[in-house]
Image: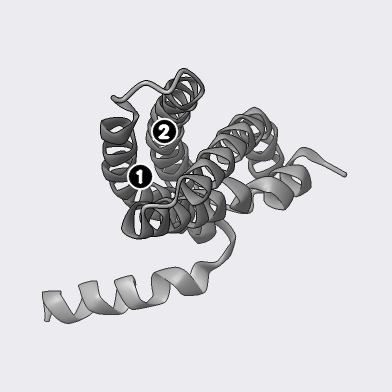
Amino acid sequence: MNPAQLHLTINHLPLVGLLIGFLVLATGLLVANNSVKKTALGILLFSLCATVGTNLTGEGAEETIDNLNLATHDTIQAHKNAAGIFARMMYGVGLLSLLVTVAEIKQDLRKGWGYILLLILCIATLWAAYDAGHSGGSIRHTEMNAYTVAEETNQRD
């Protein structure tokens, strides 16, 4: 398996994990169920680990794509920048998830605020996830750009 294949195999895990973690956390807060909220913490921590793995395979995937001339430099750079923002935000989600986990273990009353802050951070990070996923998809799925090109053409007319 080459680096690009490995990257493609795992790159959806952080995005999907974040979305599922967010939905489970929102549900846990809505129904005030501690077990559901703790499950969300586990999902978000798993997503953090997947983010690290995806980042580690990104450079190798970039080299493979460059060597095969499968995408423009600008397209790859746009994804690299978006993925970097998403990764940093996921590190924040992971750190906050870890802090809330520690607060849960210590039965710290501030954990309630931690869950709310985590939910808000997840919402912001979901936007970064969309941007990273869309720009990554644009590298090999040129049909994703068809609407954008048509829209820009119509705006110029």
Front residue (pair 70, 82): 82
Residue drawn at (22%, 72%) of the image: 152
| Mark 2, residue position | 93
Q: Nearer the viewer, residue 84 or 147?
A: 84
x, y (%) of residue 44? 52, 40
Would you name the residue on which mark 1 appears? 122
User: Is residue 152 depicted above or below 43 in this figure?
Assistant: below
Determine the CA span between mark 2 and mark 1.
7 Å
Dot 2, how many residues are within 10 Å of its Cα: few (below 14), some (14-19), or many (20+)? Answer: many
Q: Are marks 2 and 1 in contact (CB under 8 Å)?
A: yes
For label 1, count other residues whose C-alpha is less than 10 Å away and answer few (under 14), some (14-19) or many (20+). Answer: many
4 horizontally vs 143: left or right: right
Mark 2 or mark 1: name the one nearer the start of the chain: 2
- The mark found on residue 84 in the picture is none
Q: Position of residue 95 (x, y in %)?
A: 44, 23
User: Residue visible at 44% across and 48% down?
Assistant: 132
Q: Quadrant of residue 115?
A: top left
What is the quadrant of the C terminus in the image?
bottom left
For this view, does 73 lie left or right of residue 6? left
Q: Which quarter of the picture shows residue 100?
A: top left
- Residue 16, compared with residue 157, is above or below; it is above
- As drawn, 73 above or below 22: above
